[in-house]
Amino acid sequence: MQLIMTLVFIVGYAAIVFEHPLRINKTASALLTGVLCWVIYIISTPDSGLVSAQLYDHMGEISGILFFLLGAMTIVELVDAHDGFEAITSRITTSNTRKLMWIICLVAFFLSAVLDNLTTTIVMISLLRKLIADKKTRMYFIGMVVIAANAGGAWTPIGDVTTTMLWIGGQITTANIMVKLFIPSMVCLLVPLTAVSFIFKGSIKPPEAEVDLNINKTNSFERNLILCLGVSALIFVPIFKTITHLPPFMGIMFGVAILWIVTEIIHKNKNDEDKGIYSVVHALRKADVPSVLFFLGILIAISALESTGQLEEVALYMDKHISNLKIIVVSIGLLSALIDNVPLVAATMGMYDLQTFPTDHFFWEFLAYSAGTGGSCLIIGSAAGVVAMGMEKIDFIWYFKNISWLALLGFFSGVVTYLLQQSFLH
């Protein structure tokens, strides 16, 4: 059963990788792979009730991620509809490609530490669409945003889901992880950013201004209000989670509800046709549903592998055959580019308790860095990469040829930096 399921996953993964040659949308491949994995599992298991219960357990977590993604997309679309990003794009006056690359990546790095890598990627893609007309150039920028967002998310407890897991589990503390991982995470971005600076030359051509025939454009008050509320709603999510201990999707839905009420109030004097494009209903219609379904397919496929214990077996195999903890952690980071880092970290947390490695042990710190940044090596290896792949239709092969080497360079640069820092501190 496990062998068949693994083969189905590999074939499905290959179909996603070779989406363009096959001319089959990756969302269809991901959904089919996820469903088939669970069909194989339930057919080969006598206790179908147990399998169904496991699926429902996973769907609780998966649906939370999907609703969070949908809510974040809705808020970004709503800000965009009100021309809220104009307040930001108008302040980015440089047309120099290198300067713009540094500005965008550094903003993504620090924004990801405050929000998270997924939300940051959505916001930055929306900004880049308004700054760069050329599709190929924009894809390079978005590839670097994925690296920046994952690096920025690794050094704070709220920036990446795996760091959050270790924080909630008591393996790391807030102040320590921020101090220990800031420099390695920054190096993880700066090294590939420096390398790519030698590739890009010239200037950026912005998109042509769209002719808007709508006479009821938003005024400066409405633009600034929705921008401030949208950004505040995104930033409030980790605060909401800390205060209420409810999952992040509840916080994002709270933000959507507030924005929904505010937009209804400020546009109440307009007729239905004029205010339609400024409504949450319109933003929901524009949300990238195929990307959400792609997420669903990938996550349910991985959850099937986790439920059958295959991911735990991988972790146990590494523990048994690789005695060096540093190599194990680096291997987990690289493996997270192929398989979601969440179940890998969860399996690792189950293997090593706090008595073996106490809170803030170097093992947990190094794991947070590796799992958080290793996924950048392939576009399908992180939430940021998957959402970029869906929103901007970035091809797996293109990312592998053009961005993966930069991500690997940054990943190993950060690894060396962390180990040198650890050696110096001890």
Image (tube, rainbow, N blue to C red):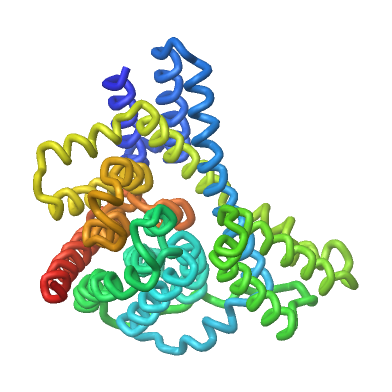
- The answer to whether 244 appears left or right of 376 in the picture is right
* Residue 297 locus on image (x, y percent): 46, 37
Residue 388 position within the rendered picture, expressed as x and y whole percent measured from the top left: 43, 57
Residue 40 in the figure: left or right of residue 324: right
| Above or below, 112 relative to 392 | below
Nearer to the camera, 269 or 170? 170
Q: Residue at x 50, y 29 (%)?
A: 55
Which quadrant is home to the C terminus?
bottom left
Q: Residue at x 32, y 29 (%)?
A: 309
Q: Quadrant of the N terminus?
A: top left
Q: Is residue 290 visible?
A: yes
Query: Residue 179 falls in which quadrant of the image?
Result: bottom left
Residue 196 seen anywhere in this rendered image of the structure: no
Q: Is residue 83 above or below residue 392?
A: below
Quarter of the rendering containing residue 200: bottom left
Seen from the viewer's position, the closer of residues 214 and 6 is: 6
Give whichever of 219, 182 is nearer the camera. 182
For the point 41% across and 20% down, the residue is 41
Q: Residue at x 33, y 30 (%)?
A: 9
Against 320, is 143 above or below?
Answer: below
User: Which residue of the protein is positioned furthest toward the front in this rendering?
Assistant: 355
From the viewer's perspective, is residue 376 above or below residue 262?
Answer: above
At which x and y percent is residue 230?
Answer: 63, 71
342 and 11: which is toward the camera = 342
Residue 374 at x, y percent in the picture: 26, 56
How many numbered circles does the render carry? 0
